[in-house]
Amino acid sequence: MRRLLLGIDIGSSSVKTSLLDADSGKSLFSKAFPEEEMIIDSPEKGWAEQDPEIWWKYVQHSIRFVLSKTKVKKGELKGIGIAYQMHGLVLVDKDQNVLRPSIIWCDSRAVGIGEKAFKELGEEYCLKNLLNSPGNFTASKLRWVIENEPAIAAKIHKMMLPGDFIAMRLSGEICTSETGLSEGIFWDFQKNGLSDKVLGNYQISKSWIPDVVPSYSIQGRVSALASEVTGLEEGVPISYRAGDQPNNAFSLQVLKPGELATTAGTSGTVYGVADKPLHDPLSRVNTFVHVNHSMENPSYGVLLCVNGTGILNSWLKKIMGAGHIDYDEMNTLGSSAPIGSEGLTFIPFGNGAERIMQNKPVGAHMLGLDLLKHDKRHMIRSAQEGIVSALTFGFRIMQEMGLDLKTVKAGKANMFLSPVFRKTFVHMNRVVLELYDTDGAQGAARGAGIGAGVFASETEAFAGLELLETIEPNEHFFDPYEEVYSTWKSHLEAIQKMSI
């Protein structure tokens, strides 16, 4: 009998489900829904919301599709893992009904609340105990609901992160994880428990916080109701959950101090693992509990996030192609423009307040446009160079914090499919880039195998992970790309001065 594991990755663009063969370590089938990107609602400027029931709808579709294509038999599925978009807020009442749309990761409405709490709680407490400013994270979003929607707040039974909600729909049980509470800025690292000071300052009832379970553990089992709507066998354990960035690092076997992972989907990230709770004094990059953290063997993830990455590429595709150009064509066009895009520069911060900009809504900007010289090729290349420049800005903050950034791992997907993006990333940051055949859904499936005891160790879980390509930097390109970054940074500084 086969030993199979299911991984679900709930993104803000799509929901992807993968089925993994535990014995070979290979993915048998994957499917993402919807075919087009999910809509992010913005009722007011700076807001970003999605209906959690839409995620659940596509989870059902993707699971049924994968099961139908792989003919899973009774007893073969050993565990389910869940990865999810970080920092979202889901609220339910005592009957597990959703009270309002989820306030998701790129929503900026709670920036002022986080800044006020940072002053009231004190910089020393926040950076030492929370490792971050409360910022625009989940706790601040919950406080916004308390202040602005008291009728909804009065009905709250539990607050959850997006992955907690999907686990609830699958099992009927509500719980969360240490990693999740740390990413929401509910976790006090010094006491290794909930921060009473944050809860008190924000007037958040401790009863709203779900029970805490380890990332690798039996966290619930597929209910009869969920079995009926998904086709999953009743009783299969849900045995892993993690936010998308810790999970992406996990999916690339980034588990030891000094190891690094990167992504470039809707947002772009670099995630480094440390055995000490590092923090940036300005909270431009953020530290959370990693998936393999324990009191005996501490493990922390230092996260650099840029909201405006793949979403800028997607915007260009819609504007330029009107549905008649695909990403491969865009990458080919961008490759035909020279390094530096002949003076055209993109600032990509057009998807909400940016953490590396200290939660300021800088916006997206195209600068240096010459109507007699620049065309689609330059726009595509300058957008990708601008995205990498934004990541490099954060990359250098991480270096200042003491992280040793020499080799970075990524899945060969999204913007890392672009030769321009890969080459710019390697040479602007002067790092070796390793590209693997994996994704967040596969990572969640491997995590499920650890949590369910199918794999005896993390090492065994990654036996089938395949390295596709290694890209080494060439000193010949260091200076040209450093010039691109310097120009980009000069433009950014000018924009910041104008907005003061």
Image (cartoon, grey):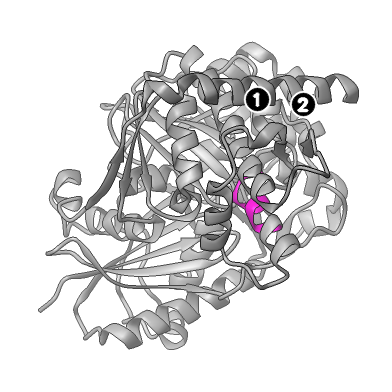
Q: Is residue 52 left or right of residue 416?
A: right
| Magenta highlight range | 307-315
From the image, tell me which residue sits under label 2. Answer: 115
Residue type indicated by callout 1: Ser
Mark 1 or 2 closer to N-term?
2
Answer with the quarter of the image where residue 318 lies. bottom right
- Which residue occupies the foreground of this view, 9 or 133? 9
Q: Position of residue 137 (x, y in %)?
A: 65, 39
Q: Main secondary structure of the magenta part?
A: helix
Residue type indicated by callout 2: Glu
Dot 2: element? helix
- The answer for how far apart the CA atoms under marks 1 and 2 are is 8 Å
Residue 410 colored in magenta in the image: no
From what the image shows, is residue 314 above or below residue 294? below
From the image, tell me which residue sits under label 1. Answer: 133
Residue neighbourhood size for the residue with mark 1, other residues' Cα within 10 Å, grouped as few (<14), some (14–19), many (≥20): many
Q: Is residue 95 something that shows in the picture?
A: no
Q: Position of residue 458 (x, y in %)?
A: 20, 45
Q: Residue at x 29, y 36 (%)?
A: 255
From what the image shows, is residue 58 above or below residue 297? below
Dot 1: element? loop
Cβ–Cβ under 8 Å for marks 1 and 2: yes
From what the image shows, is residue 75 above or below residue 326? below
Q: Residue at x 40, y 47 (%)?
A: 248
Q: Residue at x 67, y 45 (%)?
A: 378
From what the image shows, is residue 454 above or below residue 362? below
Q: Is residue 86 left or right of residue 201?
A: left
